[in-house]
Every structure is written in structure tokens, then in C-alpha cells.
Image: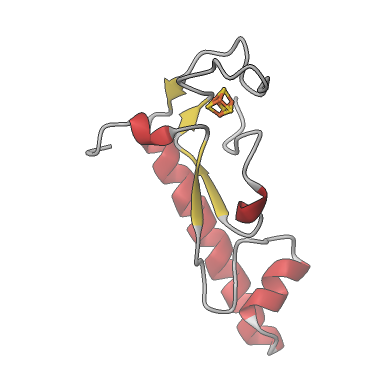
Amino acid sequence: MQSPVGPIRPPSEARSLLIRVTRNCPWNRCEFCTVFKGQKFELRPLEEVKTDIMAARKAADDVKKWAEQTGYGLGYVARYNGISWLHDDGVTNVFIQDSDSLVMKTEF
Ligand code: SF4
């Protein structure tokens, strides 16, 4: 099974929830970039993406419960458990992976 998380994200997205909706790059011709070389671009099936979103939701709900039980802030408990995308005010940013996923149809 392929990873639900893509191999790369911009540094500015370090604390964003990563949702992989495509695999690889539809352009794949930049001379300096080897990240997706030799790999075919594809859309991930909608059901797989939905499953990933629901898994993130479950993780967020679990962490919220732990935060309430311990009395620590949500963001603190999330970071302590290695979940960098969950903050005191919840999920504030989502980065859609991989490269240029906006080639998808709007309905998707
Ligand atoms: S991932 Fe970005 S930098 Fe790399 S080939 Fe595709 S468009 Fe170019």
C-alpha cells in the first residue's frame, strides 16, 4: 500500500495537516526537481482521501479527549504526541498534496 502522506511539503506547511489527494506531479519537467521523476501522476480514489480525513478527525478527537482529561492545552498535548497540525484552536491549515493537485476537477 502506498503512503497516505506525500514525500514533500513546503517548509511553511510544517504545521499543516497534510492531505494527499494526488500522487506525484502532473508536470514533472522542472530541471532542478527530482522528487517525482519517473513516477506517473494519478488521482487518489475519493474514498481513500475521505478515509484519511476521517482518520485525522479521529486522531484530533482522541487528542482533544486527552487534553480535557489532563487539563493541558490541545496544542500542547498534540505536539507532545507528535501531531504538529493540531493547535489550540483546532486544525487551522491543510496542505493538499502532492504537486499541483488543483488540476483535479472541482467536483472532486
Ligand atoms: S513537483 Fe514542482 S518543482 Fe517538481 S517537477 Fe513538479 S512542478 Fe516542478
Task: From the top left corner, tell me how far across and down residue 72 is, in percent.
Answer: 70, 86
* Above/below status of 14 relative to 36: below
Task: From the top left corner, tell me how far across and down residue 3 is, in percent.
Answer: 62, 32
* Above/below status of 2 relative to 48: above
State the scheme by which the image is colored. Answer: secondary structure
Q: Residue furthest top?
A: 38
Q: Quadrant of residue 76?
A: bottom right
Q: How many dots with numbers?
A: 0
Q: Quadrant of residue 8?
A: top right
Q: Residue furthest right?
A: 80
Q: Residue furthest left?
A: 107
**Residue at the spot 63% in from the left edge and 14% down from the top edge:** 37
**Residue at the spot 46% in from the left edge and 30% down from the top edge:** 22
**Residue at the spot 68% in from the left edge and 21% down from the top edge:** 32
Left or right of 108? Residue 50 is right
Ligand 1 found in image quarter: top right
Task: From the top left corner, tell me how far across and down residue 102 is, in percent.
Answer: 37, 36
- For the N terminus, the image quarter is top right
Q: Nearer the viewer, residue 82 or 94?
A: 94
* Above/below status of 26 relative to 55: above
**Residue at the spot 59% in from the left edge and 67% down from the top edge:** 86
Task: From the top left corner, tell me how far across and down residue 90 is, in percent.
Answer: 52, 72
Q: Residue furthest bottom?
A: 71
- For the C terminus, the image quarter is top left
* Above/below status of 58 relative to 5: below
